[in-house]
Image: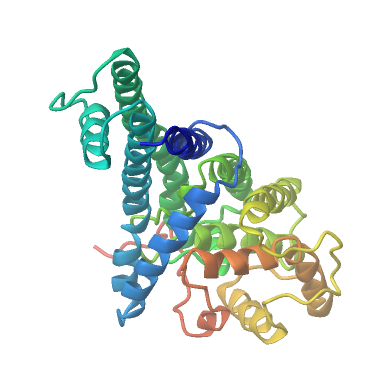
């Protein structure tokens, strides 16, 4: 083989290997958000396949079952692609090192990267390349193995609060459910515990879901209780409490909302979700005045104390919601999460009073 052609293969092999190592390091090791083109292309390709399969399903439960496999398959696709590209890169290097023929070069490369030992190079440089390739192959496998525990630890932290929310908000979680259940057990004063828990939850999600980006696509174990829907329910409940409930406004609820929109912006910046830095109650939100009135009437029937001026309450609610509205709505679409319809508040049964001691007992 001509010398110039061997040099060309050597340079091409180095470029491909650097591409693989860059993708692996920035996807699995770098503790910050990073746009890795190779990983993004693979994600888009696998995502389209799963999107086509899910779109053929008639019910959301079946679509959710299909989409729940997407992140796991994507991780395996990352690993398989990186190993194949590394095999090709080192095959080019073996050609540059003097291995006769393309077929032999790929045999030596495959034997080295999977540490099979069936075919080995000759001479010091080829043997050294074999050892280096074996180390790269083992490193790529080790990265995935070590990445999974970190990923699932963050997933479990996220889902613990989502599951706990079912006690205070029902399934699926609704903002009016949070307020009604608090009224039913006379525990408005305990809502501060919920706001604090979810203030920390948003901080954790903002950190993990902007660095371990694939976490955004891990779906909650229960189809009816998604992490996006739960986040929206808590934020809307806090906004309703601050604007419509005739009790002293809670600084903790305000901090929960602030934590929500600050950390949702971190995720939105990665996925390029639209949001405005100049927010005002005059901005348009996805919740209509009609939907707000439906929830207002429901809360009144449930016995939740409401402020006297509904018009002012609506403006206050919009003033809170504009901080996170566009990001939540974009997340519903991007992560294929069912959007809560506020009109359902007119059809759902009211929450009955509970935890009340009986005054009379007939024996």
Percent coordinates x, y for residue 280 in the rendering: 86, 67
> Who's the residue at 45% across and 69% down the image?
352
Q: Quadrant of residue 103?
A: top left
Measured as percent of width and height from the top left, residue 293 is found at 68, 83
Q: Is residue 300 above or below residue 81?
A: below
Q: Residue furthest top?
A: 124
Q: Position of residue 252 (x, y in %)?
A: 71, 45
Q: Does residue 206 appear anywhere in the picture?
A: yes
Tell me: residue 279, above or below residue 212.
below
Task: Name the residue: 39% across, 55% down.
Answer: 220
Q: Is residue 171 visible?
A: no
- Picture residue at 34% right of the left edge, 50% below the top: 77
Which of 45/123 is in front?
123
| Residue at the extreme front | 2
Closer to us: 302 or 201 = 201
Q: Quadrant of the N terminus?
A: top left
Placement of 153 over or under 53, stated as above or below: above
Left or right of 26? Residue 86 is: left
Residue at image x 31%, y 31%? Answer: 141
Total numbered labels placed on residues in the image: 0
What colouring method underlies this structural image? Answer: rainbow
Horizontal relation, residue 73 to residue 200: left or right:
left
Most foreground residue, 214 or 280: 214
Q: Is residue 236 above or below residue 291?
A: above
Which image quadrant for residue 156?
Answer: top left
Q: Residue 213: image x %, image y %? A: 52, 47
Q: Quadrant of the C terminus?
A: bottom left
């Amino acid at each position: 083989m001509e010398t110039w052609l061997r040099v060309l293969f050597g340079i091409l092999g180095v470029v491909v290997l650097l591409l693989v190592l860059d993708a692996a390091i920035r996807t699995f090791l770098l503790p910050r958000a990073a746009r890795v083109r190779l990983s993004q292309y693979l994600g888009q390709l696998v995502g389209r396949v799963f999107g086509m399969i899910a779109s053929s399903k008639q019910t959301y439960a079946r679509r959710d079952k299909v989409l729940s496999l997407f992140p796991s398959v994507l991780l395996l696709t990352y690993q398989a692609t990186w190993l194949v590209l590394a095999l090709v890169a080192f095959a080019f290097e073996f050609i540059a090192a003097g291995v006769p023929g393309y077929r032999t070069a790929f045999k030596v490369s495959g034997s080295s990267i999977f540490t099979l030992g069936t075919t080995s190079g000759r001479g010091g440089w080829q043997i050294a390349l074999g050892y280096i390739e074996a180390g790269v192959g083992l490193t790529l496998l080790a990265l995935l193995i070590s990445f999974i525990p970190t990923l699932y630890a963050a997933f479990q932290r996220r889902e613990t609060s989502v599951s706990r929310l079912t006690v205070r908000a029902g399934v699926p979680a609704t903002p009016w459910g949070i307020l009604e259940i608090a009224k039913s057990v006379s525990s408005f004063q305990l809502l501060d515990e919920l706001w604090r828990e979810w203030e920390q939850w948003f901080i954790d999600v903002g950190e993990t879901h902007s660095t371990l980006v694939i976490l955004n696509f891990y779906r909650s174990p229960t189809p009816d209780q998604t992490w996006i829907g739960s986040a929206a329910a808590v934020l809307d409940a806090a906004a309703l409490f601050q604007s419509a409930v005739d009790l002293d406004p809670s600084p903790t609820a305000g901090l929960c909302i602030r934590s929500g929109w600050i950390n949702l912006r971190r995720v939105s910046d990665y996925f390029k979700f639209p949001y405005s830095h100049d927010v005002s109650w005059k901005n348009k939100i996805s919740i209509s005045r009609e939907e707000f009135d439906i929830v207002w009437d429901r809360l009144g029937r449930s016995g939740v104390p409401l402020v006297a001026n509904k018009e002012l309450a609506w403006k206050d609610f919009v003033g809170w919601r504009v901080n996170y509205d566009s990001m939540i709505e974009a997340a519903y679409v991007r992560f294929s999460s069912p959007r809560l319809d506020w009109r359902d508040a007119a059809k759902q049964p009211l929450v009955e009073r509970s935890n009340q001691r009986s005054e009379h007992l007939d024996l």
